[in-house]
């Protein structure tokens, strides 16, 4: 039976040393229990931790691959990067603005500037200037056929249309060449403003 003091307060019959030891042991066992559980306390936390331990490294690897492959690299065999960049971004076409009211060149001027390189010496089978034998069969085909051949090209001669001279100037050069080879064609006139409409 327990002992009571005069104030009727119950007195613990255990000695003080034993009571302290029991209290320490109960606290120590609680600490040991906490030390064995870790930060994951529920299955939901375990699932999230498992997913994160898989997804985070995947994103790190993707980021590293992107970082390594995103640098400006020269193409294989391209040692001059400025030149290779310039070639990749070069113009596709060009617009040339000409004065529509400029005076047209004569057939002789166009011949000297455009045609003489081949027709003066007969290069690549071109009929020589003032060679009646070479021009005779061509003159019989008519001026329209000769002008079409000059504008669109024929044989080794490239198309002359769309170059430095307009179609009327090329036709004048054809007349100049053909007339010096025995033809009797009239030089084309400049189109009038009414004819252009």
Image (cartoon, grey):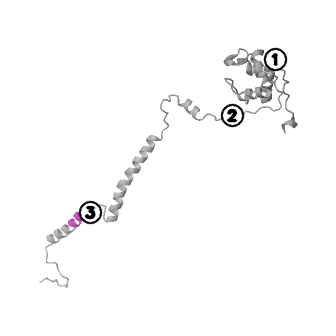
Hey, which quadrant is residue 158 in on the image? top right
In this view, the mark in front (3 or 1): 1
Q: Is residue 104 left or right of residue 163?
A: right
For marks 2 and 1 on the same chain, the one whose residue lies earlier in the sequence: 2
Q: Which residues are magenta?
A: 28-33
Query: Mark 2 packing: few (<14 Cα in 10 Å), some, or many (20+)?
Result: few
Query: Mark 3 packing: few (<14 Cα in 10 Å), some, or many (20+)?
Result: few
- Asked whether 17 or 72 is in front, the reply is 72
Q: Which mark is residue 94?
A: 2
- Asked whether 175 or 194 is in front, the reply is 175
Distance in Å between CA atoms under marks 2 and 1: 40 Å
Q: Which residue is mark 3?
A: 37
Residue 24 percent coordinates (x, y): 19, 67
Distance in Å between CA atoms under marks 2 and 3: 76 Å
Under tag 1, what secondary structure?
loop
Q: Which residue is mark 1?
A: 182
Tell me the residue at 78%/19% (across/down).
177
Under tag 3, what secondary structure?
helix
Distance in Å between CA atoms under marks 3 and 1: 113 Å
Residue 110 percent coordinates (x, y): 78, 22
């Amino acid at each position: 039976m327990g002992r009571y003091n005069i104030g009727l307060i119950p007195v613990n019959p255990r000695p003080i040393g034993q009571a302290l030891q029991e209290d320490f042991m109960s606290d120590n066992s609680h600490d040991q229990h906490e030390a064995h559980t870790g930060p994951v306390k529920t299955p939901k936390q375990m699932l999230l931790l498992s997913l994160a331990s898989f997804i985070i490294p995947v994103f790190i690897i993707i980021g590293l691959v992107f970082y390594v492959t995103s640098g400006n690299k020269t193409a294989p065999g391209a040692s001059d990067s400025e030149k290779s960049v310039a070639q990749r971004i070069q113009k596709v076409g060009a617009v040339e603005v000409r004065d529509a009211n400029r005076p047209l060149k004569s057939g002789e001027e166009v011949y000297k500037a455009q045609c003489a390189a081949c027709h003066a010496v007969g290069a690549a089978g071109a009929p020589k200037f003032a060679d009646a034998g070479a021009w005779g069969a061509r003159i019989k085909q008519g001026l329209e056929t000769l002008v079409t051949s000059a504008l669109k090209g024929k044989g080794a001669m490239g198309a002359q249309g769309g170059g430095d001279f307009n179609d009327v100037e090329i036709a004048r050069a054809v007349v100049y060449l053909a007339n010096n080879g025995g033809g009797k064609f009239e030089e084309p006139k400049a189109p009038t403003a009414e004819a252009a409409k």
